Amino acid sequence: MFRRPRQTEPDRLSMRLRKTLQPLTVIPWGALAMWYLGVPIAVGAPMVVVRDDDYTDAIERLESAGFDRSVPNRAPPPEIIEGYPNPQQVLEEINAGYKRLDRSCAVFNYPQGDPAEKGLQVYLIPNSFAYGSLYYPLEQALVESFVKAAIDEETDAGFSAWGESLRSWVSLITGYLEVNNDILDMCLDKQAVDWYSHNFGRIREANFGPIDRRISKRLDSGKEMPIDMRGNPL
């Protein structure tokens, strides 16, 4: 799989959120922001960021528009969860990996009525949790935002599902987009620079070599596509 074209227009669901929350500034984050930049990723529940000062106002606007305050729906499909002797315990263990995220944001169910929005949720996140991020997704700002959030998660919880999600997002951006080992060179946060260098940047490349962005035609076929993950010819 290789990168998609960069989006130049907002998607329908994001337009719905913009209209609901205007005139507040709404910032795409997480998988939604990566999708705009061209990463081939399933968005799932969109994550949007508002300024800290607008957070309470944004919650009230969503509730007034018929969005129901809820909890994240991470339940596996019924045919899977029913095979466990204690399904509730399984769900609690899944959610335990996202504790810091869940206590830092508000989750809403989309209003009922539109079949295209059935079962959808949206995460509303205060700006401080996403480290300022950006008004429109830009690679450097998004990587810095994810890296700082990952450092906070590792400091707070050690290993967690949310921390691994953040790490995987940085990996996808580094693989699919024009993001190289100098992406955080202008960042003033030394801890963020060191974390990226050890996990994806110069130190990682010095120890293990450059990231392999080749695409196999078929698993174990031993044959590669003539272009890499970024769409560049080999």
Image (cartoon, rainbow, N blue to C red):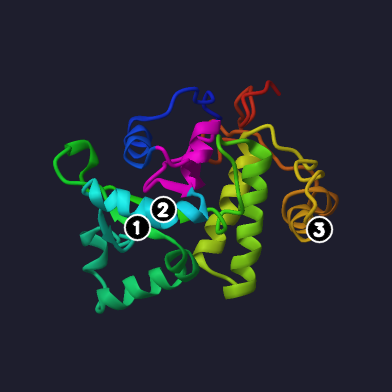
- Judge the density around disc 3: few (<14), some (14-19), many (≥20) Cα neighbours within 10 Å: few
Q: Is residue 114 left or right of residue 160?
A: left
Q: Residue at x 65, y 42 (%)?
A: 141
Residue 191 drawn at (x, y percent):
77, 61
Q: Residue at x 67, y 23 (%)?
A: 232
Q: Which residue is mark 3?
A: 190
| CA distance for labels 2 and 3 | 29 Å
Using the image as rendered, state which of residue 129 and residue 176 is in the foreground: 129
* Residue range (magenta): 23-49
Nearer the N terminus, badge 3 or badge 1? 1
Residue type marked 3: Lys
| CA distance for labels 3 and 1 | 32 Å
Using the image as rendered, state which of residue 123 and residue 120 is in the foreground: 123
Q: Which residue is mark 2?
A: 124
Residue type marked 1: Val
Determine which quarter of the picture holds residue 21: top left
Q: Are marks 3 and 1 in contact (CB under 8 Å)?
A: no
Q: Secondary structure at mark 1?
A: strand
Q: Are marks 1 and 2 in contact (CB under 8 Å)?
A: yes
- In the rendering, which numbered label is found on residue 107? 1
Residue type marked 2: Leu
Nearer the N terminus, badge 1 or badge 2? 1
Which corner quadrant holds the C terminus? Answer: top right
Q: How many marks?
A: 3
Residue 5 drawn at (x, y percent):
53, 23
